[in-house]
Amino acid sequence: MFTRNGPRCQRKYNHYLKLNHLPLYVYNSTALRNPFVIANIGTAQSIEECPQVMHARDALELVPLDSLTLVGSLAQEGERWALIKDSAGTVHRVKKGDHLGQNSGEIIAIAESDVIIEELVSDRMQGCLKRQVTLAASEL
């Protein structure tokens, strides 16, 4: 007959009843980021509210930036132009100040192998963030 409180059962499981005391660990979170506060995203600059688009949208403003490819750049009469290919294979010639991408992106600089775009991204809480994105050439 099996009994739970018998001496044989106590001897068999007696070593499980001894608790090893672990050293006390104090968690110090003063140097860590507060998880309940909105984190700063990179070098983005916060803006109160997102401005509305006041110009006629170009074809490149309807396309996400990750589907655009820089295929080349050229200089013509002291002005630098970039050649950007969309997902359909059409090559567009753009210059500084032109708009592209779905987040109100504006070209602020064109170098020989990359294009720097400043776009406005909603942070879903405080308005918009202004951030810079680099569109680099794939095989220049």
Image (cartoon, rainbow, N blue to C red):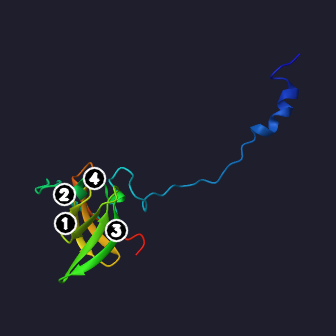
| Amino acid type, label 4 | Asp
| Amino acid type, label 1 | Asp
Q: Where does label 4 land, which residue?
A: 123
| Amino acid type, label 2 | Asp
Q: 128 or 53, which is in the foreground?
A: 53
| Amino acid type, label 3 | Leu
Distance of mark 1 from mark 3, alpha carbons? Answer: 14 Å
| Position above or below: 93 against 129 | below
**Tag 1 and tag 2, C-beta contact below 8 Å:** yes
Q: Quadrant of the N terminus?
A: top right
Disc number lying in front (4 or 1): 1
**Which residue is most to the bottom?**
78
Residue shown at 32% from the left, 53% from the top: 38
Where residue 70 appears, as percent x and y from the top left, is: 34, 68
Where residue 79 appears, as percent x and y from the top left, is: 19, 79
Residue shown at 27% from the left, 78% from the top: 74
Where residue 140 appears, as percent x and y from the top left, is: 40, 75
Disc number lying in front (3 or 4): 3
**Tag 1 and tag 3, C-beta contact below 8 Å:** no
Q: Secondary structure at mark 2?
A: loop
Q: Residues within 10 Å of mark 4 (few under 14, many from 20)?
A: some
Q: 106 or 15, which is in the foreground?
A: 106
Q: Is residue 51 left or right of 38 when viewed as pictured? A: left
Q: Where does label 1 land, which residue?
A: 98
Quarter assignment of residue 34: bottom left
**Which residue is most to the left?**
54
Q: Where does label 3 land, which residue?
A: 70
Residue shown at 31% from the left, 55% from the top: 64
